[in-house]
Amino acid sequence: MKYIIIFIIITIIAVIIGFGLCFLVSSLIRRKMKKKIPIFLHIVISMLSGIIIFITVSGLYLGIHYPADSTALDMLNNENIRETDGAYFIDGEGEDTVFIFYPGAKVDSEAYLPLMKMLSDNGIDCFVIKPPFRFALFDANAADRIIDKYSYKHVIVSGHSMGGTIASLYASKNPDKIDGVVLLSAYPGSEISDNIPLLSIYGSEDMVLNKEAYKNAEPFFPDVFDEVIIDGGSHSGFGSYGEQRGDGKPGISPDQQKEITVNAILCFEKDHVIS
C-alpha cells in the first residue's frame, strides 16, 4: 500500500509542478496580450497544459524499457505457454503447486519465460504477471486472479527486483493464501508472517540491488529464511533481456544463473512448501 501512496504523492507533486510552470509561462504571455483573457480561463488552460505535459512525459518514460530477447520471444510459440488471466501461463506436469511471478520494473514479462519454462519442466505450473506499463505496482493483487480461479494445493509468490517487493507485499497482506515467497534480487518492504517461508536469491555481481536496503529489510524476513548468493550472478541474469544499466559484469552465463536459481527453488519447495 505504501508504494501506491508514494506513487500518488509523486503524481500529485508532478502535476502541481507542471501546472505551476505552465501558469508562469502563460502569465508572461498574458502580460504581453492586448486583450487579456479571463483569469479563470487562464487557470484552466494552465491546468490542462500541466496535465498534458505530465501524461506526455510519463508516457515517454514508461515507454523506455528492457525488451525481451529473441530467445524469450520464441517461447511464445511453445504449446505449453499461453496468455490468460492477465498473465502468461506456463503449464508444468504437476497440478499441486503454482508459482506466481511478478516481473521487474520496466522489463517485458516475456523476458522471464525461459526461467519459468525451466521451472515448469520440473513439475511446477507458473504464471508470469503482465502488469500495466510493465510495473508490478499497478497490479499488486494480480495473484488473486489466479488463486481464486484455480485450486492449487500450494502457492508460491515470487518476483524480480521491484516485482519481488510487490510479491512480498502481497504475501504480507494475504498470509492465509501463500505457502512460500521467493525473491530474486529483491527484499520485502513489509513484514512477512513467520508462517510463510522465504527464499532470497541474488548474484554476487549484482550492482543494481541496494545491499544496504536489503540488510535494513532483514527484520521483515520470516523465521524460516533461506538465502542463496549465486557466485558470478548478476541482476539481469534472472531474465532474458540483455544487460541492465548499472549492473555488474557477470562471471557466469545467464543460462547457468537460471539453472542455479531453478535448483534452489526446487529445494526450497521440497524442504519448506510441500514438506
Image (cartoon, rainbow, N blue to C red):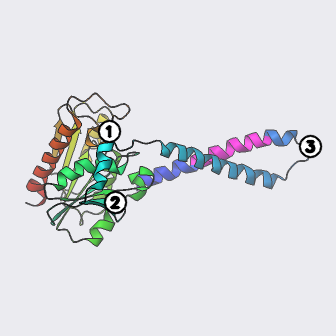
> Which is more toward the observer, 195 or 131?
131
Instruction: Identify the residue at image location x=80%, y=38%.
Output: 28
For marks 1 and 3 on the same chain, the one whose residue lies earlier in the sequence: 3
Q: Name the residue type under label 1.
A: Ala
User: Magenta part of the protein: which range?
Assistant: 13-27
Q: Local crowd at mark 1 within 10 Å, few (<14), some, or many (≥20)?
A: few
Q: Which residue bears the numbered disc 1?
A: 213
Q: Which residue bears the numbered disc 2?
A: 87
Where does the image place residue 61, in percent across and percent down from the top left?
A: 51, 43
Q: Is residue 160 left or right of residue 5?
A: left
| Residue 41: numbered disc | none
Instruction: Identify the residue at image location x=85%, y=40%.
Output: 31
Q: Main secondary structure of the magenta part?
A: helix
Quadrant where the C terminus sits is bottom left
Q: Which residue bears the numbered disc 3?
A: 34
Up/down of 151 relative to 70, above or below: below
Q: Local crowd at mark 3 within 10 Å, few (<14), some, or many (≥20)?
A: few
- 187 in the magenta segment: no
